[in-house]
Amino acid sequence: MYKNLVAALAAACCCLSPVFSPALAQTAKPAASSDPLKVAFVYVAPLTDTGWVHQHDQGRRAMEIALGSKVKTSYVENVAEGADAERVIRDLAMQGNKLIFTPSFGYMEPTLKVAKDFPDVKFESITGYKTAPNVATANARYYEGRYLAGIAAGRMTKTHVAGYVAGFPIPEVLQGINAFTLGMRSVDPTARVKVVWLDVWFDPSKERDAAMTLFNQDVDVIAFHTGSSAVMAAAQERGKLAIGYHSDMRKVGPDAQLVAVTHQWGGYYTQRARAVLDGSWKSGDVWGGVKEGMVHVGDFGSKVPKAVQDEVLARQRDIASGKLVPFHAVADVRDNEGNVVIAKGTSLSDAQILQMKWLVEGVQGRVAH
């Protein structure tokens, strides 16, 4: 989901729509100024009550509440990345939507392709990195939340072994694994993190099986970067602890959830829709985190002592103020092959973070180069 990397393709069911006709695009009439702004969203997986798609839909709903009758929103769910996405995005533009959000990395190229044919439509490529005059990009510094979750995991583990179920070895996922491990080892220096790669974003059955495999290898707390709540459900079933991701998953794991790293899109979506309405929308690239309110850690489970909660929340305030930087090295930081990747006294630049291709010391796993 980031810069200079190969798109990791998630498969979902196709959503077919009419073939594009240049004549239709040219004859489409702009909406009257008194009409609501039509805003559309394309979702890469089914809309459920937790997870990646759920959080983006919460953002859509927040926009509706904030802007009321000024906007009219719609969404298409379970759209496969690639050709199917292009057909859906094109169809939404032809239907008169003037602002279209495409929140999945694999939607980036289809979004850019459609945007060329609809210059009067504004597009927001969420997790993409390529912009155009009518295409903006935005993403969140999820790794900041991962570092904080690692602190909680380090305080709560009894085996000193955590698990991590991951979709694809792209920079965004590697950032999360490394930040989680650094956070965990900041309070438990002997901690290890075992990674299982799935090569898919959303497959509840695979996610559950991976979690169960890790629980059989001394893992007593688990994190994940996938699209469903299956790992949380597995932790609940096995009496283990898990980090909720994308959204609060205490409904699924009332006893299992240690803490949740949640993504907050409502503010950004509302701001961008308002900019289209008042004519101030411009293409750009936003990468916000804890400070900007786009990433939040909280929703602690019932098993987490107040002292641990207070520590995590204090470190969250430190990240917001800039006092704590997850990828800053107090001492040399090495990858799990022994190479120094962050020299003592230095921090990784955004460019280095966005191109991350290594796993930090303490992680048991490999990255295919």
Image (cartoon, rainbow, N blue to C red):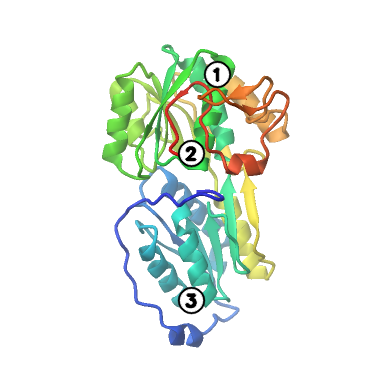
Question: Looking at the image, which residue is at 54% across and 14% down?
Answer: 188
Amino acid type at mark 1: Arg
Q: How far apart are marks 2 and 3 (CA)?
A: 35 Å
Depth-wise, is mark 2 or mark 3 nearer the camera? 2
Three-letter amino acid code at disc 2?
Val
Secondary structure found at label 1: helix
The alpha-carbon separation of the residues under discs 1 and 3 comes to 51 Å
- How far apart marks 2 and 1 lie (CA) works out to 18 Å
Could you tell whether 327 is left or right of 302 in the image?
right
**Helix, strand or loop under label 3:** loop
Q: Badge 1 is on which residue? A: 185
Residue 291 in picture, x, y percent from top left:
67, 39
SS for dot 2: helix
Q: Mark 2 sits on what residue?
A: 173
Pinpoint residue 74: horizontal percent, then vertical percent.
Answer: 43, 64
* Residue 331 seen: yes
Q: Which mark is residue 96?
A: 3
Q: Which residue is drawn at 63% across and 31% down?
A: 327
Q: Which amino acid does label 3 sit on?
A: Gly
